[in-house]
Image (cartoon, grey):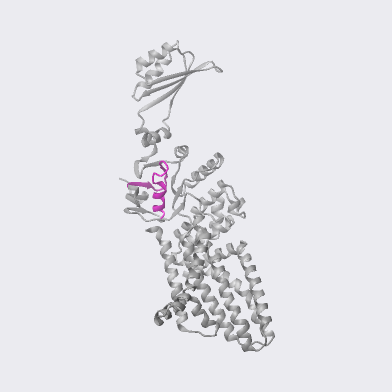
Amino acid sequence: MENKAEIAIDIKNLTKLYPGRMALNEITFSVKKGSVHGFLGPNGAGKSTTMKILSGLIPESSGTFSVNGKVGFLPEHPPVYPGMSVEDYLQFVFDIYSPAQKNKKAVADVMEKTGLLHVRERLIGNLSKGYQQRVGIAQALVHNPEIIILDEPTVGLDPVAIADIRELITKLKKDHTILFSTHQLHDVELLCSDITLINNGKIVVTGALEGILKSLKTRMVISAHVEKFSEENKKEMMAKFKLLSIEFSPDIEKSQILLKIEANMTSTLKREIARFLTEDSIGLLEFKEDDLSLEEVFKQMIH
Amino acid sequence: MYFRKINILVKKELKDAFLSPLIYILTGLFCSIMGWLFFNYLMQAKTLTSASMTQAVITPIFGNINFIFVFLCPMISMRSFAEEKKQSTLDLLLRSQLSEMQIILGKFISNMVLVFFMISFTFIFPVILAVSGYSDWGVVGSSYVGVLLSVMAYLSVGLFCSSLTDNQIVASLLTFCIILGSMLLVITVNASNNYIFSLLVQYMTVPFHYEGFTKGLFRSYSFIYFASYLGFFFLLTLKSLQARKW
């Protein structure tokens, strides 16, 4: 289906057995070159195990995988030496990962990319968690890998730091293929073009984010602002459109009423509801279909 | 290229070590004990001839250097892998272009440099003796070779123990127990009635080989002993590092 050259990571029937426990059960998925691929799943689903295998840290039990290009890896805990300065540390990582190269600029470049230039002299142990995480990401980047694997880059950070990391990933996606795991579904919606969902060592779903959201969309949620709304209106609508629920609450400040309508997905329903609400006795002011959030998809798939 | 890669690690390790207080504390401790012992041995010596100096000062001093390193080596080597494990930086090294053996050698060489740094302060003893006319340099030289070889053996044990755990205290205690245990084999030697058996066990102990060096003897089988001692513990360390793949 896809061109071979366009696949950065290809995993086929990968299985990992730990004594008495199957961490990965024949998982198969691929990561397209140049994409940002979100790797989701509850704790203990097998995300870290997959990433460790891909980065060559632990061997697989069976199955195959191919990684087309150098890999930069940020494990769950950033592998930093607290007693080293940021610059010395990155230089050391650069030296042991590409000992044949003598690129003086590599470290300065990566510090600029990750916004570490102003802390280059400071000891890593004295930096905040957000900055240590940045150093961890810089460490994965410094030898200029084509593929970057990040294991929960935003875990345990404050909202500002999370936004910074998100911005950094956005910057990186121009030049690198990125596979990252996260619990921040918001990140995934903002950053990823593809996702893979894993649970109990098995792939639940994998593919383009939009396609997955669309295929899973069986319900729709509409929020509307109207001038007037009563219990009778509610009963009438429920009967007429076979809705799942209607909630309404008055917004006193704007003297409006806020409606939340949930219904099963049918092609013409949305139009019909809109027409109904524009009647004089109700008076439609605003009408919007809410997107199905990834969080709901996530819950739906896992349970 | 092989050694340049090791060199990268050695440099980093040494910078780490010399920026932390531990090495200075150990060196201070070592120097004060050795200085005090040297002074006492010198005071006890009744005559000041080359032969009597060797007997009364040089031999016991080197015996003590060797004994003190039984305690110091575990403290020097305990960080090597245990700390890396604790900081989860060991994976960073293992994923790099350095092979497992290069990592082990890098750690070992940097530990050796630290020990050499400590021992270098004892160079003042022969200098002091030289001022009073001492000239038996062969014994001094072979004693230093002996100390270095046995320290290498201790450090290789330490490296292995450090690779087993992420707790530095456990690593250093285990190292100490193994080194001391192998020294106490001498008791078995004394207790045994079987001549061949006691010779065999005696050959296994570090002090037996070290003793030759303090008398100024370079015995080829002692070099083979230390080489195989190092090789054995390097192999164990290598297997321990590879255990993550089991």
**Foreground of the two, A124 or A104:** A124
Q: Does the magenta stretch include residue A155?
A: no
Q: Give x and y (percent) for residue B13.
A: 55, 64
Q: Relative to B199, does residue B166 appear above or below in the rendering? A: above
- Which percent across, then down, holds residue B2? 46, 69
| Magenta-colored span | A26-55
- Residue A15: percent from the left, percent from the top? 33, 50
Closer to us: B220 or B100: B220
User: In the drawing, does residue A233 fall left or right of residue B47?
Assistant: left
Asked which quadrant contains residue A259, the reply is top left
Quadrant in the picture for residue A267 = top left
Q: Is residue A171 visible?
A: yes
Residue A209 in the image, given as x and y percentages of width and height: 39, 38
Residue B99 visible in the shown view: no
Position of residue B205 relative to residue A139, above or below, is below
- Give the vertical position of A144 relative to B125 (above or below): above
Residue at 41% in and 25% down: A221
